[in-house]
Image: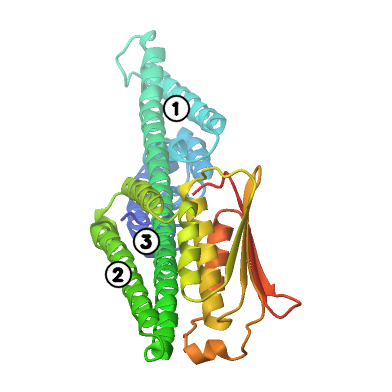
Amino acid sequence: MTTTGEVRAGAEEGPWWWGRWRSALLDISLAALSAMECAVEGIQFSRDAGLFVPVGMAFGLFAGLTLLLRRRWPVAVVLVSVAITPAQMGFVMGVVGLYTLAASELPRRITAALAGMSFFGMFIVTYVRAHQGVVRGDLSIAGGFIPFLSVTTALGMTAPPVLLGLYIGARRRLMESLRERADSLERELMLLAERAEERAEWARNEERTRIAREMHDVVAHRVSLMVVHAAALQAVARKDPEKAVRNAALVGDMGRQALTELREMLGVLRTGEGAVARPAPSAVPLAAVGVAAAAAASRVAEESSEGPCLAELEELIGQSAAAGMVVNLSVEGEVRPYAPMVEQTAYRVVQEALTNVHKHAAGAKTHVRLAHRTAEIAMQVENEPPPEPGSARAVRLPSGGNGLVGMKERVSALGGVFVSGPTDAGGFRVSAVIPAQAAA
């Protein structure tokens, strides 16, 4: 993991304007070297100017210590070096100052202007000193060679530090840009990982809810009918043995159907164990999240197409009629096939509504209406008041209170509308409308 700029700044903070202690020690060393150089060269300067030697040395020492400010005020350091160039001192200061100026974030026009001033100052001083040396006889060179010597000296003192500073500054900015991009990419990856984890957690919760809803729909209806038939069997066992035998056969058939559906659901869960296994986040690339999500969506779509359909609605109503319920089915519109999820949801709504009638209004007459419309399919299950109050409690059917919630979740997931509530006559009505082109 890379280190962000804030952490680096806090970990490497140095004194005053230095970002690091190492930079402070380097500048102090360079300033000490420049001060010694200027102090030594101040001796000759004081003699040439007719000053006391301590005065010239103190002037050189003070001027050389200006190099301490090179990171804070590089322009001032270069100006001081240009100013003391006629005194033939400050060469270390000039070279280091030009390098620092070129490597800084200052505009290039300022760097060019100061580098030009330093060049012309060095050129003039070298030209004057060389000419004086030739006149005095200290230099045995031709007079025409003096300009070349001056230009070469000025370029040697200005061009290398400026070019090196430009290179180091560009490299530093490039490295900082790459570091910022790496930090930004790391933050984006962390956000993507967090979002992927949130999506995975959401998908797991949705899958748990879906499995719980399927288990409720599969088990509640079958077992409710089994309990109703068992109660009827207990009531007629001695009075009508033949009816008791028929009820016992129905209980056995419904139990086998419930077991078959449970085995199918458990088989799906067992098959998906490998896909549900959650690997370590560091070992899975982010691209695998999308692949797993696509595979999960495909698997859910395939499993959804294996559920019940509207063609089995008459059989469902027949089972309730066999349990003693009076059920009327009316179908409006042209019967046509729908998407598997639409048909399965419509079937589950009717199934759960009939189960609630068995639980809470046993023996009540029930009307099931199914309407095939142009762009939607509508269903309504309405029961009249039970003939004998308290009959539902006599059968002792437990209720978890999740049936209506599950129906509303199913219908809302397909973009439909679900409404339920008591009627004015004392019964209960469940209505749902699902778009015909709802996406699974």
Residue placed most toward the observer, 200 or 73 = 200
Disc 2 is placed on an element classified as helix
User: Residue shown at 42%/47% (left/top)?
Assistant: 180
The colour scheme of the drawn protein is rainbow
Q: CA distance from mark 2 to mark 3?
A: 74 Å
Q: CA distance from mark 2 to mark 1?
A: 105 Å
Quadrant where the N terminus is found in the figure: bottom left
- Of mark 2 and mark 1, the one earlier in the sequence is 1
Disc 1 is placed on an element classified as helix
Asked if 114 appears above or below 181 in the picture, the reply is above
Q: Is residue 275 left or right of residue 164?
A: left
User: Residue shown at 51%/74% (left/top)?
Assistant: 355
Q: Is residue 13 visible?
A: no
Residue under label 2: 256
The type of residue carrying mark 3 is Glu
Residue under label 3: 12
Q: Is residue 69 visible?
A: yes
Q: How many other residues sit within 10 Å of disc 1, few (<14), some (14-19) or many (≥20)?
A: many
Query: Exactly how many numbered labels are in the figure?
Result: 3
Residue placed most toward the observer, 47 or 1 = 1
The type of residue carrying mark 1 is Met
Q: CA distance from mark 1 to mark 3?
A: 38 Å
Residue 259: give x, y in percent of width and height.
30, 70
Q: Residues at badges 2 and 1 in contact (C-beta under 8 Å)?
A: no
Residue 10: give x, y in percent of width and height.
41, 64
The type of residue carrying mark 2 is Arg
Residue under label 1: 122
Disc 3 is placed on an element classified as loop
Q: Which mark is residue 55?
A: none
